[in-house]
């Protein structure tokens, strides 16, 4: 059983390593998520598992631990208005002669968001005429491995517009699944990034950053560092999408609101 003291030491460790601010009352959730790791290692006590983590000199178990406690809720074309705005801005910049686009899906989970971005790009632009790279990042190696496969359950097709289904998905040999078309997958690369530990290694600049529904797990200190480094990596006029339940209140750097949950870095006007 996870007592209050043990919960608190795990809570502090999770915050230190991932920036996730685990609230009181999540004892049962934490216990359930670390239980599988404990069984695989052969430990029965959460206290013993904590000591095991403290002595994890190569960091391999820490990665598995963070995989276990990470929340990954996502689906294709989540918050669809964002993709409409993304398409509008993309068209505008392309019409103005821009041919190179760099896009970051900061909390990409199992890949639904970056592939939604890639399908929108492929539907909007003639890929042969543009230099496009989409970076998908997550703290969880487990979800990144699934994202790289690009294979999903057929029930998820309902989230993808019909004309995108026809153009960018294919049935697999397992008829209960489908895969993302190779020309779409080729636009996306994946890397493990801890969003609580800026500065990030990418050089940028990015035209668009999708950082949605992850800041809700951070306190204001971690959140402000994150949005400041995104600001550094965005080009002037670049666009940031955040979750509808998130806010840039108290943000230490200047973003201009395009629409609720859509912001741009000060620079050229890119109104939708």
Image (cartoon, rainbow, N blue to C red):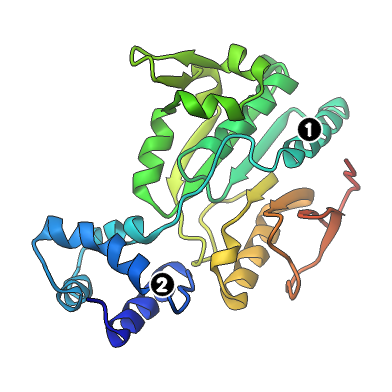
Residue 6 visible in the displayed image? yes
Q: Where does residue 269 sit, x and y in percent of width and height?
A: 91, 47
Task: Give the answer, above or below, for where 268 lies relative to 167.
Answer: below
Residues 236 and 173: in front is 173
On-image quarter of the N terminus: bottom left
Residue 111, labelled with which disc?
A: none
Residue bearing mark 1:
90
111 horizontally vs 165: left or right:
left
| The image quarter in which residue 183 lies | top right
Residue beneath the point at 63% across and 33% down: 117
Q: CA distance from mark 2 to mark 1?
A: 41 Å
Residue indicated by mark 2: 26
Give the residue drawn at x 45%, y 21%.
179
Q: Label 2: state its secondary structure.
A: loop
User: How far across and down, in percent of the image, does residue 2 sit?
Assistant: 26, 77
Tell me which residue sits at (18%, 77%) in the image: 51
Above or below 249: residue 159: above
Q: Is residue 65 left or right of residue 252?
A: left
Single out the mark in the foreground, 2 or 1.
Answer: 2
Give the structural element (helix, strand or loop) at label 1. Answer: helix
**Earlier residue among tags 2 and 1:** 2
């Amino acid at each position: 059983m996870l007592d209050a003291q043990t919960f608190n030491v795990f809570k502090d460790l999770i915050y230190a390593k991932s920036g996730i601010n685990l609230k009181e009352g999540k004892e049962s959730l934490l216990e359930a998520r670390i239980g599988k790791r404990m069984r695989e290692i052969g430990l029965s006590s959460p206290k013993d598992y904590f000591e095991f983590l403290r002595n994890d000199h190569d960091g391999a178990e820490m990665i598995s631990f963070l995989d276990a406690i990470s929340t990954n809720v996502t689906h294709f074309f989540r918050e669809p208005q964002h993709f409409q705005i993304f398409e509008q801005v993309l068209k505008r910049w392309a019409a103005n002669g821009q041919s190179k686009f760099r896009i970051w899906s900061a909390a990409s989970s199992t890949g639904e968001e970056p592939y939604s971005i890639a399908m929108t790009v492929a539907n909007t632009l003639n890929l042969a005429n543009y230099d496009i790279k989409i970076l998908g990042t997550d703290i969880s190696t487990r979800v990144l491995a699934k994202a790289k496969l690009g294979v999903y359950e057929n029930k998820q097709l309902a989230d993808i517009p019909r004309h995108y289904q026809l153009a960018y998905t294919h049935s697999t040999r397992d008829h209960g699944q489908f895969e993302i078309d190779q020309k779409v997958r080729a636009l996306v690369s994946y890397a493990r990034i801890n969003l609580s530990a800026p500065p990030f290694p990418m050089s940028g600049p990015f035209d668009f950053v999708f950082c949605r529904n992850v800041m809700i797990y951070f306190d204001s200190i971690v959140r402000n560092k994150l949005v400041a480094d995104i600001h550094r990596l965005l080009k002037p006029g670049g666009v940031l999408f955040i979750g509808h339940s998130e806010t840039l209140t108290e943000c230490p750097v200047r973003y201009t609101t395009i629409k609720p949950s859509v912001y741009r870095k000060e620079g050229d006007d890119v109104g939708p």
